[in-house]
Every structure is written in C-alpha cells, then in structure tokens.
Amino acid sequence: MKRFNIITILLLAIIWSGCSISKDLSLPKVAPGLFRNTLQKDSSSVGDLPLKSFINDLTVQNLIDTALLRNYDMQIALKNIDAAEVLFKQSKLGYLPELKLQVAASSSRPSDNSLNGLSLNQFTGSTHIEDYSANLGVFWDADIWGKIRNQKAGALASFLQTEEARKAVQTRLVANVAQGYYNLLMLDAQLEIAKKNLKLNDSTLRIINLQFDAGQLTSLAIQQAEAQQLNAAQLIPRIEQNVTLQENALSVLIGTLPQAINRSSRLDKMSLPQDLNAGFPSSLLSRRPDIKSAELALNVANARVGVAKASLYPSLVITASGGVNSFKASNWFSMPASLFGMVSGGITQPIFQRGQLKSNLELAKIDREKTVIQFRQSVINAVGEVSDELTKVEKLKTQYSIAEKRALTLQQASRNASLLFKSGMANYLEVITAQGNLLQSELELTTIKTEQLNAVVGLYRSLGGGWN
C-alpha cells in the first residue's frame, strides 16, 4: 500500500507537470504599412545586404574587421553571451532531481551519571557512542505548474537577448567606423582646398603689393588682402587638429592606441549606392537587434509572471535517501545489516506569507506591461530613424546638386575676377570676395558629400544592417 501511494504521487506529478497556469502576452501591432513619404514596390531592403556587399571599400572593410575583433565594447558583449549561455545550460537541468552524497562520523561521551551514560554502559559496556554513516540523498521538486519550465524559457530568452545586444553593438560599431573614415576623407579634402586657396591668396597679395608700389592702390587693399590670406592660413592648423582628433577617435573604435589611419581613397572618388530601397517597416521586427531584444524581454517578463503565479499553487516535493549506518566502525559496511532507506513525499500549499507572493505576481505583471510599452517605443524609434535617414538621403542629394553648381559657378567667377583684376577691369574687393566665396562653397561641398555618405551608412544601420 505504501509503495502504491508513492507511485501514485509520482504519476500525478508527471501529469501535473504538463499544466500551465499562465498565458503569454502577445506582441502588439505597432509598425505602419509604409515609411513616411515612400512608395515601396517590394519588400527588398538594403538592410538585408551582407556588410561587405554594402561597404565595398577595402580600407573601410579592414578597419571594421579590426574593430569587430579588438573593440572593447564588442569583447564585453561576447563575454555577456558566454555568461548567459552558462545560465541557460544550468536552467535546462531544472527538471532533474538534486543528488547529494554525505559521509559522516561522530563520537560522543555522555556523563556516567546521566541516563544515556548509564544505559550505554549497561548495554554496550562502553563509555562513548560512535556513529558512522554514508548516504545518498535525492531531492525532487515536481514542476506541477510549469515553474521550472518558465524559468527555462526565461533563461533562453535572456541568452538570446545577449546575442541581440551583440548585434546591436556591432551595427553601431560598423556605422561609427565607416562614418569616422568618411569624416577623415572630408578633412583631407578640406585641407587640400585650404592649401590651394592659400596659394591663390598669396598670388593675389603679390599682385596687390605690386600695384601698391606703383601707386595704383592704397594700404587698405594690402591690409584686406593680408586678412583674407591669414583667414585661409588659419584653416590649415584647425583642419590638421581635427584630422588628428578624428584619427584618435577612430583608433579607439578599432581598439588600438592613437595612431595615424591609412587612407587609400579620396572623398571625390567615393560613390553612393543608387538603389536604397528600405522595404516595409514590418521587416524591422525581424532585422533590428534592439526590436528583437525588446521582443525577447517580453518573453522574459512572461516567464517571470508564470514563475510568480506558480508560487501561489501547491508544490510537490519528493525526497529519498539510502546508504549504510552503524555505531561500530568494524561493521560499518556489513551488508545487508547496515543498509537503510527512506522515501517521502509532501505537498505544500502557501497560505499566508504577508502578501509577498501576491505582490511578486502583481509586480511581475507590471513589469510585463512595461516591456510591452518599451517594445512599442523601440518600434516607433526604429521607424523614426529610418524615416530620418531616408529624408537625409533624398534632401542631401538635392543639396549636393545645388552646391556643386554653385561651386562651379564660383570657380569660374574667381578665375574671371583674377583676370579682370590683372587687366584693371575689376578692383581688389571683387577678387577677395570671389576667392572667399569659392573657399566656402568648396568646403561646403565636401561637407555635404560626407553627410551623404554618413546618411547612407545611417540608413543601413537603422534598417538593421551590419550584423550579418
């Protein structure tokens, strides 16, 4: 009969372990049908492109490869994955019973005037008691209400979250490295423009000095020409300073000490992708690491609600132990006389714990509602980022076209002003103004070109590209 009761309890535990007293909360539908001001024809997206298919410059690729290997944020993200994997592997063992081996020996001497001492001396003829035992104990908490199953699901979601966190670090790192390199190319181009403009100002100043010596101009002309020359000269150390700072920042990104960065490209030789299809916003849910992480956070929150709710219901604990025991070392392992065994099972129902269990459940539900809000926010932020980058790509294209025409016009104007000035048909102010306008227009053109390159990379990152 006792054996039948134990078997019955075990069967009930196995049957009840399939029960679930919590329901998962589904993801809300947040993503719109289309991005703002776009008319998509298909679901293809540049975010699906592999990294080296999207960025084909070998120098940028090498810098990114170095960053992925040596960047410290990336290394920390990988260690977080290792830690989460250890916890997940441990959670998969939750269904197994605990097994403990205990070996003990004790010796005590009761008082000769005590009842134990008198009885011991009477029956054994000894003044001390020895006890030797070795036993193997089993402890099993039956997963009746899915508590362990929910803990395992939560651990899995947490493990997957660390992988999505790594992807998020990688996408951001790829974009930062590429944009840092493009900024270096911009500074190189601006430094070249500043030096060229300085030579042009030097030539103009020499002509003005000659005309001053001939009595054709006053000292005011020389002063204004010198001021223009010094303004161009001042740009050179400022740009060189920015070059060094950008190289240092890029060196930190790729995990090396500050050093010079080799450049094999020129800004004017960098081409922009023509087909920048963004696809549909719904595809962001499966591609953006931050959205996937928010989705997995909801899985973790669902699991915690299940664990908290299961704590309100009865728990079935089965224990068993067996081994050898003897009060003499000489017959400790005498079989089968020294063998002993015990099996017990019990059901525990929490009744009153000062509201702690119900409070834990309510807090878990609130946390789950917060994760839903955070998921909505992550989707809206992602859609907003894509819309921003699409707008930048479109409007910067128009700006560059206008700025390019303006630069060409001012180049011609500067040449004409110099020729007219030499022939006495234009004054020095017209020459200085034309050269100053040309300098600003050429610098602005390099800035817009860099913004275009950065916007393209930003669109790639915002669409979830860079981790594949």
Image (cartoon, rainbow, N blue to C red):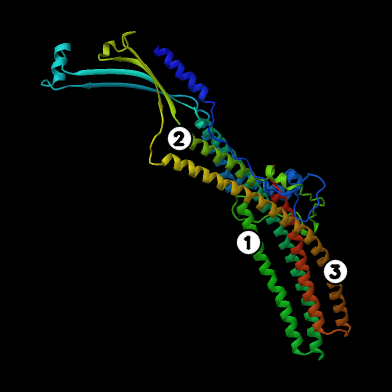
Whether residue 460 is visible, yes or no, is yes
Give the residue displayed 86% in from the left and 84% down from the top.
Answer: 426
In the displayed structure, 343 sits above or below 221; it is above
Query: In the image, residue 466 lies at what x, y percent?
Result: 69, 46
Q: CA distance from mark 3 to mark 1?
A: 31 Å
Query: In the image, residue 145 lies at what x, y percent?
Result: 50, 30
The residue at which mark 2 appears reads as 312
The residue at which mark 1 appears reads as 245
Callout 2 amino acid: Leu
Q: CA distance from mark 2 to mark 1?
A: 59 Å
Q: CA distance from mark 2 to mark 3?
A: 77 Å
Q: Earlier in the sequence, mark 2 or mark 1?
A: 1
Callout 1 amino acid: Leu
Residues 274 and 347: in front is: 347
Query: In the image, residue 271 lies at what x, y percent?
Result: 80, 54
Residues 266 and 158: in front is: 158
Query: In the image, residue 401 lies at what x, y percent?
Result: 83, 63
The residue at which mark 3 appears reads as 408
Q: Earlier in the sequence, mark 2 or mark 3?
A: 2
Give the residue displayed 75% in from the left and 73% down from the top.
Answer: 198
Callout 3 amino acid: Leu
